[in-house]
Image: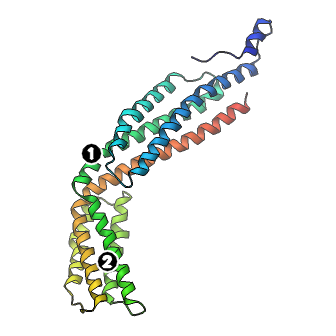
């Protein structure tokens, strides 16, 4: 319902002096603000829980209770919130614009939940495909580079290190990151890996290496980067789908924040118009 008129207005009506337009606008604003404050408090509680679970997923991407919370709590809540808001649009004109933003806010929150739920199967495929191991191998390869530079100390690094990181860095900036951003697709990246990156790294692996400890670390670094790029190639299609899903989630979360800020601005304008 629209909410009861304040007692002061009821008293004014009973005394025979009807409320002014300003009084009615103030009453409509107060009733609406009280109603949506309850809903926004409920949203804040559920969104905080989602944020906490997302943080936990950094260490455990599978995290069953995250998906359970999305399905059993977040989705029903935001579906209900959106339905309630759509059915309770205010009549007072200054509040209409604010309410439209609040509806868009709820739509974006629900879109985030749907986008995240769509990643559950992708996450399962990533776990089964040991995608985490692929990226831990990347950390290992980078660690070997650091170990090599420490071992060399103030000496001059082998030129093969420069060749290695020119190949690795060029691939990352021109192919891998653009795939992450949605500019290049997986087949393009796979072709680059097969035809250019992996052959270059294989050539580096076949070169002669001295037997001293620092140079053997460098050789291990070359082998680690070669293995990483080989394992990355078949994983590209799944990675592309995961990055696309992540962008959808991020876009929905950002849209919700924009709509909420716009709602606050519209409410301030409505308050000043009372």
Q: Residue 48: give x, y in percent of width and height.
A: 49, 42
The answer to whether residue 111 shows anywhere in this view is yes
* Residue 33 picture quarter: top right
In percent of the image, x 44 and y 27: which residue is there?
80
Q: Can you tell which of label 2 and label 1 is closer to the viewer?
A: 1
Label 1, secondary structure: give it: helix
Q: Eyeballing the image, is 232 above or below 197?
A: above
Between the C-alphas of marks 2 and 1, the distance is 33 Å
The answer to whether residue 104 shows anywhere in this view is no
In percent of the image, x 25 and y 53: which residue is there?
127
Within-10-Å neighbours for mark 1: few <14, some 14–19, many 20+: few
Residue 209 placement, left or right of 146: left
Q: Eyeballing the image, is 96 above or below 149?
A: above
Q: Residue 135: give x, y in percent of width and height.
A: 31, 64
Quadrant of the rendering where the C terminus is positioned: top right
In percent of the image, x 47 and y 37: which residue is there?
46
Q: Residue 196: give x, y in percent of width and height.
A: 24, 74
In percent of the image, x 46 and y 26: which residue is there?
83
Residue 145 placement, left or right of 95: left
Between residue 23 and residue 45, name the one nearer to us: 45
Quadrant of the rendering where the N terminus is positioned: top right
Q: Eyeballing the image, is 200 above or below 56?
A: below
What residue did someone put label 2 on?
A: 167
Within-10-Å neighbours for mark 2: few <14, some 14–19, many 20+: some
Residue 124 placement, left or right of 66: left
What residue did someone put label 1 on?
A: 121
Residue 260 placement, left or right of 199: right
């Amino acid at each position: 319902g629209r909410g009861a008129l304040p007692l002061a207005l009821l008293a004014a009506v009973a005394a025979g002096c009807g409320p002014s337009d300003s009084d009615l606008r103030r009453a409509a604003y107060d009733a609406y603000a009280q109603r949506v404050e309850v809903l926004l408090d409920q949203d804040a509680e559920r969104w905080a829980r989602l944020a906490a679970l997302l943080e936990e997923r950094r260490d455990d991407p599978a995290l069953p209770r995250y998906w359970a919370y999305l399905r059993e709590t977040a989705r029903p809540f935001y579906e209900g919130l959106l339905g309630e808001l759509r059915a309770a649009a205010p009549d007072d004109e200054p509040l209409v614009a604010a309410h439209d933003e609040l509806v868009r806010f709820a739509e974006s929150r629900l879109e985030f939940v749907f986008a995240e739920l769509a990643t559950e199967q992708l996450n399962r495929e990533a776990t089964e495909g040991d995608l985490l191991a692929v990226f831990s191998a990347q950390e290992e390869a980078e660690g070997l580079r650091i170990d090599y530079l420490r071992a060399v100390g103030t000496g001059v690094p082998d030129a093969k290190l420069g060749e290695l990181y020119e190949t690795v860095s060029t691939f990352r900036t021109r192919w891998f990151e653009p795939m992450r951003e949605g500019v290049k697709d997986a087949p393009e990246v796979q072709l680059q890996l097969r035809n250019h990156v992996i052959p270059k790294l294989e050539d580096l692996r076949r070169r002669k290496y001295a037997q001293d400890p620092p140079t053997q670390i460098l050789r291990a670094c070359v082998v680690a980067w070669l293995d990483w790029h080989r394992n990355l190639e078949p994983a590209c299609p799944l990675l592309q789908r995961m990055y696309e899903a992540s962008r959808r989630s991020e876009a929905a979360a950002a849209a919700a924040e924009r709509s909420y800020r716009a709602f606050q601005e519209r409410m301030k304008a409505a308050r000043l118009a009372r």
